[in-house]
Image (cartoon, rainbow, N blue to C red):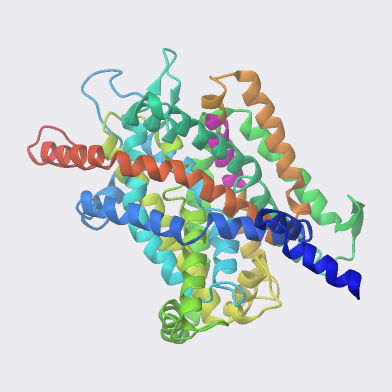
Amino acid sequence: MEKSHNKSARSADLPKETKLFMEMINLTFDEILEKIDGLVWGVPLIVLILSAGLMLTMRTGFIQVRHLPRALRLLFKEEKSDIEGEIKGEVSGFASLCTALSATIGTGNIVGVATAVGILAGGPGALFWMWIAAFFGMATKYSEGFLAVKYRTVDIDGHVLGGPFYYIENGMGKKWKWLAKVFAFFGACVGLMGIGTFSQVNGIASAVTGFFDPNGENTIELFGNSYSVITVISAFVLAICAGLVIIGGIKRISGVAEIIVPFMAILYIAAVLVLLIANITRIPAAVGDIIGGAFGLKPLAGGALASVMISMKSGVSRGIFSNESGLGSAPIAAAAAKTKEPVRQGLISMTGTFIDTIVICTMTGLSIVMMGSWADAELEGVQVTTDAFSKGLYFLPSGAAAFILMICLVFFAFTTILGWDYYGERCLEYLSGKNKTAVTVYRILYIAAVFIGPYMTVSAVWTIADIFNGLMALPNIVALFALSSVVARDTKDYFKRLKNGEITE
């Protein structure tokens, strides 16, 4: 007894840092990740990102409201030039958007929404905060696309490189190059260990295995654990397919994206529209749950205030994960667009957030809330959305709804894998001074990460992605605040020239 008392006394005398270290040692890997995620995605970062969106909304005169119709029209309108060769870039504006959407529309739209509105996360109210983040995020995404084109670099051979690292260095000045390198480092990490690989292939493997081998009857031993043969096969096939496209670079990635992205978006939207129409009487109650949950009127565990904060954190972080507004990824693709007008590409980039969150994420979240799947604590990840589809599309043959969702998820996640490889390569290209060997090594590691993704736990995968997202967003948000006056000035000038007939769309 005396020894125990003395041990406690000595522990009480230890410095605070030592105690924290000792506590960390006793935590599991998932618990450590959760603690780090809590530090990164605290209230300060959420407020910072929403503040940037609010500021840019005001400085651009609510561009996401006033010029959204124009932006949607520009998606299918090629920019014309009176001078041969005047327009620089590698791909069309639409192709650059498809590349960005290929990275944006992924498991975040199916699995991410499910993890955000689940009973163990933010509940239905998280969807409302996803809307808020997306509304202001549209102004943020516009500004990112604008700055990417304005400050991009074009080599003699026509190779384009742009994104936050260049608008930080060229826009804020050379003394901020260290911040540009910080962004590029975390950007490469997000691709390799976050959004680009682990979370996407994990979502695909879970969906495919859940459909073809739900009871885990056919297993194989790997890494000291037992996995379904379907999981192993799907990971291998994905790694091969991804590698074949990735080797071709931006033109092959954008070419594949131009075909798959519109197809997968239309297929998914059509399926969810059928679900919503078939269960239309449930929509009013679902909307009530979403609004009530967002403001703590239907609190989760911990009380109303705690419920609001949890819903806000889940909604904003998952919203950013899904549409990537403020993250700084989409402008890397926007920089490759063939255009001479930064504002024009900014408008096109802005539609990405609208399509991703306001349309697709809303449809997913509404389906989950309507069918009550969010309240089942035994469901995890893609299982939540699968349950909602199965209940909502009750008139289809058994397994048909799950099959449709699986196909959509495979396409969504596969294109995200491709898009984020491009982002990661461009970040590494900036860090390494365009070292081709470094880029080749990155591609190999990236494909390897695609293969091992399914063998990580769902919670660990999404937490790692959240951490790198937050760390990547910080340098970009700083740049958006610093360069907001440039965005406001040039935006005003563009619409003035357009009104006076000096330029055309």
Residue closest to the far left:
500
Specify the quadrant that holds the N terminus.
Answer: bottom right
Residue 362 image position (x, y, % from top left):
45, 67
Please determine whether, in this image, residue 69 is positioned above or below residue 88: below
Residue closest to the far top:
156
Quarter residue 372 falls in? bottom right
Residue 11 shows in this picture: yes
| Residue appearing at x 76%, y 61% in the figure | 27
Residue 359 image position (x, y, % from top left):
42, 62
Residue 126 shows in this picture: no
Q: Would you say 99 lies left or right of 206 here?
A: left
Residue 426 falls within the magenta-colored stretch:
yes
Please determine whether, in this image, residue 390 is positioned above or below residue 247: below
Quarter residue 479 falls in? top left
Residue 50 falls within the magenta-colored stretch:
no
Q: Give the magenta part as a residue range.
A: 414-427
Q: Would you say 425 lies left or right of 234 here?
A: left
Please determine whether, in this image, residue 275 is positioned above or below residue 410: below
| Residue appearing at x 52%, y 30% in the figure | 426
| Residue appearing at x 40%, y 50% in the figure | 352
Residue 470 image position (x, y, % from top left):
52, 50
Give whichever of 98, 145 is nearer the camera.
Answer: 145
| Secondary structure predominantly adopted by residues drawn in magenta | helix
Q: Would you say 428 lies left or right of 170 here?
A: right
Residue 322 image position (x, y, % from top left):
50, 55
